[in-house]
Amino acid sequence: MTEPAGDDFFALWVYLARSPLLWLTVTILIYCLCDRIAAALGRPPLANPVLFSICLIGLLVRGTGTAYATYFNGAQFIHFLLGPATVALGIPLYQNRRLVVRAILPMLCALLSGSVTALLSAVLIARALGAPAAVVTSIAPKSVTAAVAMAISARLGGDPALTAVLVILTGILGAIIITPLMNALHITDKRARGFAAGLAAHGIGTARAFQVDPLTGTFAGIAMGLNALLTAIIVPLLL
């Protein structure tokens, strides 16, 4: 007597779900699909492939009853690549080093004001709302790329998982808002637009900036890297 096809499929899924490569493959395929859809739509700010990938993967993990630890065990290689990807942004920085040197003074002023504003606003609002110290610590580095933010949070007694969620939310909101905001403010300088995106929305904002223009993406990458360094220094002093 043969088993129903549904039972066979379920058994196959249980077998595949134990393999770390399954969730790594699923994550990559879903992101590629969302990126193709965003490209087909002309890459409007709301069609953010990271946002849609998170939603689809979350629904899939939830619908299949997969534990987050199981998913992360398979997708952690992507998490590992966050560090090398951040370092690789030094390549466009070197390629455009002359432009960077010309704008070094306004960049440093924007970096300092933007980094301090992002930190103080997050910490003061969290404390005003009565958030516990661990939550305040987790919120403080939200505008920095995930690899650095999670390390800062863990070292100071925060919750790295909460920090990761806040970092992603900050990046997605920044990537969605940055283009309409810059247009509304009539800011057309590609360097300024990119620097603002990288400073406020870290890696996701930088990815969005590279989609718009290579020069914009270069300055976004510069801002992201410098903000990570400055935040790692300021957050311990602030808290």
Image (cartoon, rainbow, N blue to C red):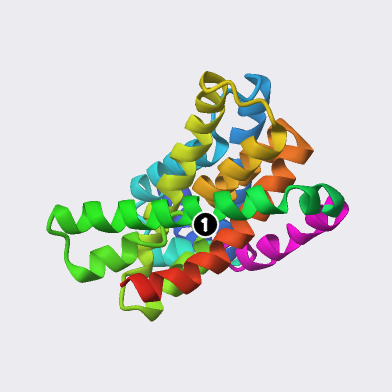
Q: Nearer the viewer, residue 117 or 131?
A: 117
- The quadrant in which residue 161 appears is bottom left
Number of on-image labels:
1
Q: Residue furthest front?
A: 105
The residue lying at 47 percent from left, 56 percent from top is 115
Residues shaded magenta: 78-96
Prevailing secondary structure class for the magenta stretch in the rendered image: helix
* Horizontal and vertical percent position of residue 237: 38, 75
Question: In the image, is residue 61 part of the stretch drawn in magenta?
Answer: no
Crowding near the residue tagged with mark 1, few <14, some 14–19, many ≥20 C-alpha atoms within 10 Å:
some
Q: Nearer the viewer, residue 201 or 98?
A: 98
Question: In the image, is residue 91 part of the stretch drawn in magenta?
Answer: yes
* Horizontal and vertical percent position of residue 57: 46, 45
In the displayed structure, 48 sits above or below 81; it is: above
Q: Nearer the viewer, residue 90 or 233?
A: 233
- The quadrant in which residue 222 appears is bottom right
Residue that carries the numbered disc 1 in the rendered image? 112
The residue lying at 34 percent from left, 70 percent from top is 238
The answer, for residue 163, to whether it is visible in the render is yes
Question: Which type of secondary structure does the marked residue at label 1 adopt?
Answer: helix
The answer, for residue 19, to whether it is visible in the render is no
Instruction: Tell me: 98 left or right of 126.
Output: right
* Horizontal and vertical percent position of residue 220: 65, 46
Q: Disc 1 marks which amino acid?
A: Leu
Instruction: Tell me: 69 left or right of 42.
Output: left
* Horizontal and vertical percent position of residue 6: 41, 43
Instruction: Tell me: 144 left or right of 160.
Output: right
